[in-house]
Image (tube, rainbow, N blue to C red):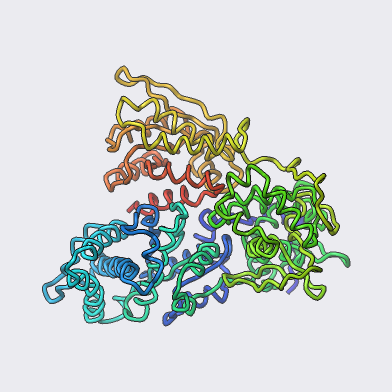
Amino acid sequence: MSVTLPKDALQKVQIGQSFAEYDFVRQDPGIFVATPASLVANQPDNKKCFFVGRRGSGKTAISYNILAKNRRAVSLVPQVFDLMRLPLDHEEFRDTRQRPFKSLVCAFERALLGELVRNWVHANTWKFDERHPAISKDRGLIEGCDFDARVLNLVTEIFEAYSNPNERLWLRQINRAKDLILEVNTVRENANFDFLFLIDRLDESWDGSDSAIICLMALMHGCVQLMAACPSLRPYLFIRENIYSRIRDMDNEFSRLETSVVFLDWTTEKLTEFVERRLVRSFSTKPSLGDAWPHFFQETADSDSKGEIFTYCQNRPRDVLTYVSFALESAISHSHQKITPEDIRNARERFSTSKLKDLGDEFSENYPNIQLVLKLFYGLATDYTIGAIEGFIQKLLVDHKIAKYCKDWFYNVTSPSQFVGVFFSIGFFGVNESKIWTYKTAGGDAAFMPPLCASSIIRIHPAYHAALHLREMVLPSLTDDTILQVNGILEDLPEGVTFDGYQQKLKDLLIQLGSTPKGKLGAEQYESIVGETVKLCFFRALTNVQPKVRNTGGLVIRDWIASNRAAAGFWEMVRNRYDATQVIWECKNYSVLSADDFHQAAYYMGETGTRFVVIAFRGNEVTPQYLKHVEKIARDRKGMAFVITEKDLKVFLRQAVKGKFKEDHINEIYDRIERSFG
């Protein structure tokens, strides 16, 4: 049946958010696209447990889809990777066959098994009894601790035994995991005892250290072992590709893990369905999937909108959605009835700039401040000979910013083959082989970069040409007269701050936060630290940060108020959901909050009209009592008292030092608070 859409069809389209955390995919299962990875994840007898993909490849969407369909699926977002300090030198954990690493694996196994039993109890499926002594021994950890606290306690317990001269104590601790597995398997009677743990957003609050990678590696080994030994427990880990790459490079028994990996790859057909489901969502009479694209995109003999967008976006769904969204805005602003080739071209530079920033942010974990190198290609060429690449490297070697902020990785990749290998692995470079351009493939497996030779040509991926204003040419060499510059690239920094000054301010704030005394003595300094953190870490969304002074009990208290100008992401969601064109930051220079602190937040909501108030305090835990106050405010005021700890402030600052500006961590705080509501 032929379907004719109204002339203003584009204005009715609700394309959704490119970030699954804020997208209506959470409430509307009709727009979820079944991919090979999601089909594997939903198989009841699936034995794969690692789902690997780049940022924006659909990991979180799969997690939400499973949670919506499976009543025994449980979301876990561990924060322990940032909290844990390994009790031995990192080198002692490098060999996965030795006792230190085995001890760490055992701690994660017991923590997951404890989480399983805890869910049994909460679901009234099973009760503690004396017939199961191994489970009873861990009852205190199971009932009294969440997953993170349980891991920390178990690591302390196991490594105290490890350091004891009596080796039987350590062996007894290690055998506790085996005893728990045996008893859990004995208890299991039917499918009601089976739980699926979705362990997602693993790297949101960590510092990217080797310690965090070692802990994640131990969790992965524990998951593989439990998947095989315990039918009641299926752990799924959703891992970003850049983190997976670090583990692959570090783990000397990686072959034990890679057989359990599923990569999140997208085909043209699935990407088409992904866009079409969103385009037709608002219409009661709609074209069928597979036929909807031409109703919204104008095709000509010289254009292929689908191929252009998908290739340009490197087949990544988040990028596709962002690009289509920009093109849709262009079409509406020009009163076009369909998205034209001109609209796609108009969206290109805006999208390219966004993608360049996103690339630097995504791989800041592996290559801190890599955006400094990316920007130095500005105004050069699309294609390079090996000689030109070598000349580029030579100029980087004498660049003071590179020496200061990229030293952790740059000096290890100063040969042309190493340098090209790094930028090929992140999807920035392609290599010409037999007149075909080869770029990094989708998914977590490393693409085989064609071997380089003297005649090889290197090309920057077309997605970045517009942002870098590259000339369509092959650059044969870089001479001494060539000056690398970033003119024309908008510096992603707060106004009036140089990169060197920005980095130094962030590092100074971290030091000050650690040394500022709690209570009245350090109150003014803490208030200043919070204000500077808002200005330096959230400047893309929160502007015009000003002090809001009040007097309480003779003490001048300086809170902060910021204008919310976010066009996307977490802060846009906050503005829309809570009418938060202004965001209040309350500063509490003490470790324990009281009911009065929450009453003050509620008062601010009535006074300013905003229904979103951030409470920053010096503790490191948001207690159940605090969450009760937050829930009451949500119920009575339809607002959010958003509690952040000292640890959270440090995470924001550390991530900014590395050039990581995404909102994953603050979004996870929000999700954790929301999920606590009854």
Residue 604 falls left or right of residue 135: right
Q: Nearer the viewer, residue 185 or 282?
A: 185
Above or below, 609 relative to 417: above
Q: Nearer the viewer, residue 120 or 94?
A: 94
- The spot of residue 543 in percent (x, y) is 57, 33
- The spot of residue 482 in percent (x, y) is 81, 46
Is residue 138 visible in this depiction of the protein? Answer: yes
Residue 270 falls left or right of residue 102: right
Above or below, 82 relative to 259: above
Residue at (34, 32) in percent of width and height: 589
Residue at (32, 81) in percent of width and height: 229
Residue at (49, 30) in percent of width and height: 561
Residue at (34, 51) in percent of width and height: 677
Quadrant housing the N terminus: bottom right
- Image quadrant assignment for residue 131: bottom left
Is residue 127 visible in this depiction of the protein? Answer: no
Q: Residue furthest top?
A: 554
- The spot of residue 522 in percent (x, y) is 34, 27
Q: Nearer the viewer, residue 22 or 209?
A: 209
Q: Residue furthest right?
A: 301
